[in-house]
Image (cartoon, rainbow, N blue to C red):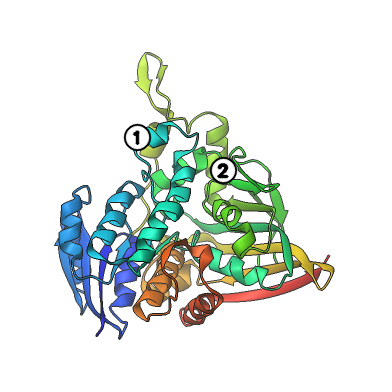
């Protein structure tokens, strides 16, 4: 009997997942749900197996009612709804997939006792939710987009080529630039919030918080026209790798997420000027929050085929990018660097293939590949894991499926 899947959220991630699952032979029924009824209706009308529902994800009972009988719940909603959806999955006995690491898992009293509630919430998820999902014979996976997600699985590929690992770099360069002002191809509020926050890194065996835009690295890749600069950026990956250094990353001691490109070049001077601050201030007698003022002047990310097509028709300044994993360590007693370069459709090719932006393509398709593992019973684990914790067989299936979507790995090894 085929799977029944509930997808919560109709943004780029959720809509891509449900469209890919509509093509899966092992999926019989899909439910597409969001607070935006028009978005649900527009999506469902192009699908064969889906029915739509309007839902307020603040309402736990409403999620449970919709999820009854589902094999999997895919959470593509904002972070604040994570706890509700996780608890609903447990209540109905479903597997769970989340594009992010959810916020708010700790109650107010527990959160008040720790310095970093988000980080402690991740640890809590593994410790408290892991046994609950395992007892039910189910699996929950978080961080299942492109980064975190695809990049985490690719990092697991990189460390295969080492006997021991000392350092991991996840380097992402966003080189797509339009002639129109479009600094971000995903949610501007999410982008700017990440830009304003201190990063996460794993240094000397400890999870630490380097300042945003600090610790720059410079790389020259053979498919980019010039050397690029990438800096510290708040992302989940170093936290995952640090927590699983000994179990999944061969003893790694240092792990970083480095980010560069158009979005960084736009946000860094704003950060230095204090314009990404969330603190209210008075300017010429007017109270304002600098972050809100900047956000109000940013265009929304394009979502529809028509919006993406219009940007491309107006012209692109560049259509490049890089996602590279570097793993350093030893192999056969020699120091070695392994690079895994992720190649995926660019802006124009993504539009031609699917009518979406390159950001939507990589994040949405990357997420759908994790769902495909569920749909085809390829997961052999139970409990609560992050996307860096797949088994080798699961990683292999992931990238075999990715190759069919034009997402490929180029593995390069160097003695150092």
Assign the C terminus to one quadrant of the image: bottom right
Locate residue 110, reporting x and y percent: 40, 36
- Crowd tier of the residue under label 1, counting other residues whose Cα lies within 10 Å: few below 14, some 14–19, many 20 or above: few
Q: Earlier in the sequence, mark 2 or mark 1?
A: 1
Query: Residue 13's x, y, as percent?
Result: 36, 63
**Left or right of residue 304: residue 384:** right
Residue 149: % across, % down? 49, 63
Residue 129: % across, % down: 38, 55
User: Which residue is labeled 1 in the image?
Assistant: 108
Q: Nearer the viewer, mark 2 or mark 1?
A: 1
Could you tell me which quadrant the N terminus lies in?
bottom left
Question: In this view of the protein, which residue sits in the foreground, 151 or 2?
Answer: 2
Q: Residue at x 60, y 53 (%)?
A: 242
Contact (Cβ within 8 Å) of mark 2 with mark 1: no
Instruction: Provide the secondary structure element on which disc 1 rests.
Output: helix
Disc 2 crowd, CA 10 A, few/some/many (<14, 14-19, 20+)? many
> Can you identify the residue that label 2 sits on?
199
Say if 295 sits above or below 20 in the image: above
Q: Can residue 222 be seen in this snapshot?
A: no
Q: Is residue 133 left or right of residue 224?
A: left
> Could you say which is closer to the camera, residue 298 or residue 373?
373
Image point 41% across, 36% down: which residue? 111
């Amino acid at each position: 009997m085929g799977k029944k899947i509930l997808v919560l959220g109709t943004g780029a991630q959720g809509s891509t997942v449900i469209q890919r699952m509509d093509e899966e032979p092992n999926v019989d029924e899909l439910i597409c749900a969001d607070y935006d009824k028009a978005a649900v209706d527009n999506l469902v009308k192009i699908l064969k197996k889906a029915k739509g529902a309007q839902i307020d994800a603040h309402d736990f009972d409403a999620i449970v009612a919709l999820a009854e009988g589902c094999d999997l719940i895919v959470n593509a909603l904002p972070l604040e709804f994570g706890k509700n959806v996780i608890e609903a999955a447990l209540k109905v006995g479903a597997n769970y997939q989340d594009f992010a690491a959810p916020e708010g898992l700790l109650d107010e009293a527990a959160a008040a006792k720790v310095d970093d509630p988000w980080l402690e919430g991740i640890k809590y998820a593994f410790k408290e939710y892991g046994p609950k999902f395992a007892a039910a014979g189910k699996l929950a996976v978080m961080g299942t987009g492109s980064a975190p997600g695809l990049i985490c699985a690719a990092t697991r590929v990189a460390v295969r080529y080492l006997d021991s690992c000392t350092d991991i770099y996840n380097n992402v360069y966003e080189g797509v630039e339009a002639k129109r002002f479009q600094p971000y191809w995903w949610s501007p509020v999410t982008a700017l919030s990440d830009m304003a926050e201190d990063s996460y890194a794993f240094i000397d065996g400890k999870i630490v918080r380097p300042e945003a835009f600090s610790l720059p690295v410079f790389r020259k890749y053979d498919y980019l026209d010039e050397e690029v600069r990438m800096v510290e950026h708040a992302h989940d990956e170093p936290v995952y790798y640090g927590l699983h250094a000994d179990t999944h990353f061969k003893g790694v001691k240092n792990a970083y997420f480095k980010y560069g490109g158009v979005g960084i070049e736009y946000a860094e001077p704003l950060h230095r000027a204090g314009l990404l601050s969330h603190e209210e201030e008075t300017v010429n007698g007017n109270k304002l929050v600098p972050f809100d003022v900047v956000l109000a002047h940013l265009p929304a990310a394009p979502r529809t085929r028509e919006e993406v097509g219009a940007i491309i028709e107006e012209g692109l300044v560049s259509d490049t990018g890089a996602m590279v994993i570097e793993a350093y360590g030893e192999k056969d007693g020699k120091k070695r660097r392994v690079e895994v370069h992720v190649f995926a459709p660019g802006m124009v090719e993504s539009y031609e293939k699917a009518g979406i932006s390159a950001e939507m393509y990589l994040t949405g398709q990357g997420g759908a590949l994790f769902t495909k593992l569920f749909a085809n019973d390829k997961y052999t684990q139970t409990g609560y894991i992050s996307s860096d914790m797949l088994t080798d067989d699961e990683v292999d299936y992931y990238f075999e499926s990715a190759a069919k979507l034009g997402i490929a790995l180029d593995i390069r090894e160097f003695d150092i």
